[in-house]
Image (cartoon, coloured by chain):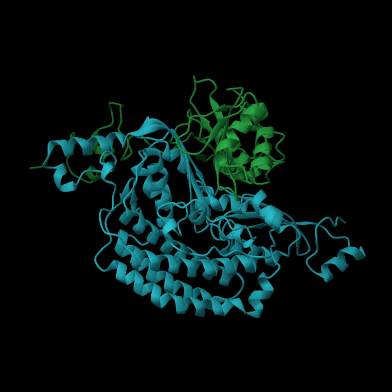
Chain colours: A cyan, B green
């Protein structure tokens, strides 16, 4: 009997060593529709008793060919498709995509637009982590966390709806700005949300952080070493949980992140529990950032003035002025004219680093757009980390990696 | 730590065939496809580019030679610099590039995806299967000669295909709501869904 993998407990080890029983490996398929695979992920597993000897993720059930679609439409038309990448944090995707195209167009957006985008990103981070936290609680058997976190998430979605007109598929950014300015009083309501959110967050995290059952399910489970995390290209809370303090908001600031003070939490052991702790702390830091943005929320324009050739002309002028009509017509039919060249922009999204690699030959449509999705890279470590784990711990590991299949499969 | 600016010069002095690649943001280099792995290893070991962010490829469309360019993006967790490494594939018919799995385990899935969607074969890859499309899928959909609508193929499930003869059917693009048609027989009322339920159109008289 092969014993090349580590046994999770003494009993399993003794049973394997005794050679009294001849065991047969069992194949088990988990998913594509299974509550703990968080979407349409299928795991093709090979089991020796309860211990995994092999785990092969099968992807592609949600593949829609987003990159192919991007090559066939203009830059602004693709914004709604970015909602459907990480559909738990659409605002963060919108912002990442908009900045990537702005890098191509060499556009600078004004301070107010940057501030709105930072608020959007951080609120999206809170809502994505709340979702991840609630679902993770259910995965390991703690229902009540879900109820707490979903109540808070609902409040955020009310704010998103007020800002963008949609709860889920926000499509809020445009190349060179955002779709519209913040509504009256919205900033105050965000501030009020932050004030009441912090105590509730502490209460929610207290349900898990010292919970014996939760600790048993997560501590020393799914340990990812620093070297492995780097080798597999993990990013976001999963990389930081393994002790690598990489956070692009800090290290390569975009959208004015350099003005705000926040800490980058990192884990020590790289196990499921550390990844949970990192996400918890990130929500506190996000609130801290949002509070700072609100404290010095700048006035002025919310779209770049030199974005005229990209941003549609004001709607009331389109039907009354010849020049604006022509401009609108050209924008709709041919798209905003971009310079030729290659840009690669990465943003620190809730799930990790989301990258857009745009190859332009000029004109209104990208020649090639590659989406570097964090969930795809984070999942690639699964065969490595699941080997030798118990089957019940697979659920715990999956939840702690916190992936989204919409982004993974694109 | 070496400043990010001078690593391209260092790479060029060590590997004479490396040239600078035009770029709008990060430093970028063109590398002969056979030198890619030594260059990536040199960048990783000497300039701390320890994180492989992405592997992808560009199809420059049929008739352009070289038709395929493979692109690697590296990031350094200590200097926070990026570098773009690009290599043109030698063959336009069976493009291939060396695998980087030995350097970064994460390259495995990126290369499987590039094989799946663009048909770049990564030599010596340990497990070069399709990843997003199903195993028997015959095309590489991100290539420029593959139509946006798709091509009719057999279903992934062989048993179902044999039983039902059902197929994956290409999306109806022409005649759809957002596609301008150059085929004369499609009238505006067929292309515009909002006109569908009207009792009159360009073929039927408006009722009195």
Q: Which residue is pictured at 68% across the width and 46% down the height?
A: B105
Q: Which residue is pictured at 37% across the width and 64% down the height?
A: A293
> Percent x, y for residue A155?
38, 71
Q: Which residue is pictured at 55% across the width and 33% down the height?
A: B118
> Percent x, y for residue A48?
79, 60
Answer with left or right where residue A262 lies relative to residue A119: right
Q: Which residue is pictured at 12% across the width and 39% down the height?
A: A321
Above-or-below relation of A200 to A253: below
> Percent x, y for residue A104?
40, 39
User: Quick one: A178 or A396, which is closer to the camera?
Assistant: A178
Position of the N terminus of chain A by quadrant: bottom right
Task: Work out whether residue B140 can be spotted.
Answer: no
Choose top left, top right, bottom left or bottom right for residue A108: top left
Determine the residue located farthest toward the left in the rendered image. B208
Q: How many marks?
A: 0
Answer with left or right where residue A19 lies relative to residue A329: right
User: Quick one: A68 or A82, which is closer to the camera?
Assistant: A82
> Percent x, y for residue B40?
65, 37
Task: Work out whether residue A348 can be spotted.
Answer: yes
User: Quick one: A41 or A118, which is closer to the camera?
Assistant: A118
Choose top left, top right, bottom left or bottom right for residue A334: top left
User: Quick one: A355 or A256, which is closer to the camera?
Assistant: A256
């Amino acid at each position: 009997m092969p014993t090349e993998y580590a046994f999770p407990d003494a009993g399993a080890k003794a049973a394997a060593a005794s050679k009294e029983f001849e065991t047969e490996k069992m194949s088990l398929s988990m998913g594509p529709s299974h509550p703990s695979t968080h979407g349409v992920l299928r795991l093709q597993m090979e089991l020796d008793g309860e211990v995994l000897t092999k785990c092969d993720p099968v992807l592609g059930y949600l593949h829609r060919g987003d990159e192919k679609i991007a090559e066939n439409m203009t830059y602004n038309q693709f914004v709604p498709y970015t909602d459907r990448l990480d559909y738990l944090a659409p605002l963060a995707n919108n912002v990442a995509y908009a900045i990537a195209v702005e890098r191509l167009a060499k556009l600078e957006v004004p301070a107010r637009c940057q501030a709105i985008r930072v608020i959007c990103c951080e609120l999206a981070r809170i809502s994505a982590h709340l979702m991840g936290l609630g679902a993770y609680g259910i995965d390991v058997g703690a229902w009540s966390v879900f109820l707490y976190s979903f109540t808070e998430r609902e409040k955020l979605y009310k704010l998103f709806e007020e800002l963008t007109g949609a709860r889920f598929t926000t499509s809020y950014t445009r190349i060179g700005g955002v779709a519209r300015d913040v509504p009256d009083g919205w900033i105050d309501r965000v501030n009020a949300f932050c004030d009441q959110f912090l105590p509730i967050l502490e209460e929610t995290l207290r349900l898990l952080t010292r919970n014996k059952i939760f600790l048993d399910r997560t501590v020393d489970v799914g340990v990812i070493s620093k070297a492995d995390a780097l080798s597999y290209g993990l990013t976001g809370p999963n990389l930081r949980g393994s002790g690598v303090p990489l956070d692009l908001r800090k290290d390569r600031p975009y959208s004015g992140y350099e003005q705000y003070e926040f800490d980058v939490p990192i884990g020590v052991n790289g196990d499921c529990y550390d990844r949970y702790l990192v996400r918890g702390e990130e929500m506190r830091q996000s609130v801290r950032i949002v509070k700072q943005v609100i404290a010095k929320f700048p006035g002025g324009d919310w779209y770049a003035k030199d974005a005229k050739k990209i941003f549609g002309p004001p709607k009331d002028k389109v039907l009354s002025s010849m020049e604006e009509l022509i401009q609108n017509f050209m924008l709709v039919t041919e798209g905003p004219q971009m310079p030729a060249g290659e840009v690669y922009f990465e943003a620190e999204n809730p799930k990790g680093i989301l990258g857009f690699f745009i190859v332009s030959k000029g004109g209104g449509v990208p020649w090639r757009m590659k989406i570097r999705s964090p969930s795809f890279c984070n999942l690639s470590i699964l065969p490595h980390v699941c080997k030798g784990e118990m089957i019940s711990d697979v659920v715990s590991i999956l939840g702690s990696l916190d992936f989204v299949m919409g982004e993974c499969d694109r | 730590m070496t400043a990010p600016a001078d690593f391209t010069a260092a790479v060029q002095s060590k590997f004479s065939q490396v040239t600078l690649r035009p770029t709008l943001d990060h430093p970028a280099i063109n590398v002969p496809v056979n030198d890619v792995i030594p260059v990536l290893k040199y960048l990783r070991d000497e300039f701390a580019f320890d994180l492989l962010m992405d592997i992808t490829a560009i199809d420059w469309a049929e008739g352009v030679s070289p038709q395929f360019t493979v692109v690697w993006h590296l990031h350094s967790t200590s200097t926070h610099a990026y570098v773009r490494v690009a290599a043109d594939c030698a063959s336009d018919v069976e493009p291939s590039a060396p695998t980087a799995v030995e350097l970064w385990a994460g390259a495995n899935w990126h290369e499987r995806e590039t094989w799946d969607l663009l048909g770049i074969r990564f030599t010596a890859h340990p497990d070069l299967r399709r990843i997003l499309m199903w195993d028997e899928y015959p095309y590489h959909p991100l290539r420029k000669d593959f139509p946006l609508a798709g091509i009719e193929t057999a279903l992934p499930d062989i048993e179902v295909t044999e039983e039902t003869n059902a197929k994956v059917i290409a999306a109806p693009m022409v005649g759809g709501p957002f596609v301008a048609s150059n085929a004369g027989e499609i009238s505006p009322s067929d292309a515009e869904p909002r006109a569908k339920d009207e009792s009159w159109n360009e073929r039927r008289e408006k009722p009195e």
